[in-house]
Image (tube, rainbow, N blue to C red):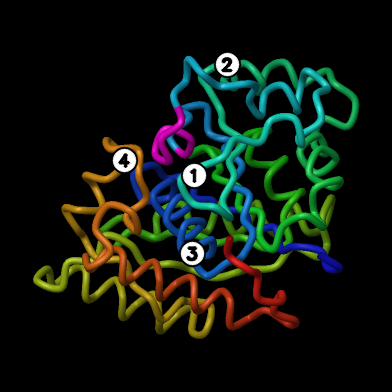
Amino acid sequence: MGHVGRIICISNQKGGVGKTTTAINLAASLAAAERKVLLVDMDPQGNAGSGLGLKRETLQGTVYDALLGGRPMGELLHPTELRYLQVVPATPDLTGAEVELVNQERREYRLRDALRPLAEQYDYILIDCPPSLGLLTLNSLIAADSVLIPLQCEYYALEGLSQLNHTIDLVRQAFNPELKMEGILLTMFDSRANIANQVVADVRDYFKEQVFTSVVPRNVRLSECPSFGKPILLYDIKSKGCESYLALGREIMQREPNPPPARKVA
């Protein structure tokens, strides 16, 4: 491909903010635009894989095998319904990795080392982090070029964000000085709720241009599609949820310094 893809870590230690939903549907939106995308699931819940139709009993290896089993990441790629999207899935086995990594050499760099041979094969590598700030998230932040933070449009939205920003600063200082903020994505927005509108106003006022223009609404179709193993793009392309993630994909692609050449579709 002649270029190195961007590695974007999707992280928020607060659960239930739409992190995995964002990972799946942003990946699908970029793939629909013929960008070659790899989605790496670093969350032991394994929802990024199941949300794209992967069945746990048929997996031919997971990210655990790369981090602790020494298998090349290239052997762990799983196809999806979208031609340009592949997944490295996770299972609950990854829960033990937090403990198992403690005594390993280069424990913080395991994911970065595993992804490095694949960087030139993809336009984007997205990493779905667990809702914590442990070793799995640390590995993800060190491997990434930038961090995308989904932020729920509710009362406690900003709770913990300062802690995440502090962690990002520490990672920059100690491990990854090039780590950037990709942006803050406002999720689960309900225009009828005064608090949601207030959160949007406050976040935009404080974080300025770091906040994406795209806002993901509360949307029934978005909450339904994981149970069918499909991204919203393949489940209901006309839904408001799909429109918001397609718009987010366009915002991300507008930042490409040298967009990849168009690919022929067979």
Between the C-alphas of marks 2 and 1, the distance is 20 Å
Residue density around tag 3, few if under 14, some if 14–19, many if 20 or more, within 10 Å: some
Residue linked to disc 4: 226
Mark 2 or 1, closer to the camera: 2
Residue 93 marker: 2
Mark 3 or 4, closer to the camera: 3
Asked whether disc 2 touches disc 1, contact meaning CB atoms under 8 Å apart, the reply is: no
Residue linked to disc 3: 32
Between the C-alphas of marks 4 and 2, the distance is 21 Å
Mark 1 or 3, closer to the camera: 3
Between the C-alphas of marks 1 and 3, the distance is 29 Å
Name the residue: 83% across, 68% down: 3
163, above or below 189, in the image: above
Residue density around tag 1, few if under 14, some if 14–19, many if 20 or more, within 10 Å: some
Between the C-alphas of marks 4 and 1, the distance is 21 Å
Name the residue: 38% across, 50% down: 21
Residue 13 marker: 1
Q: Which residues are magenta?
A: 48-54
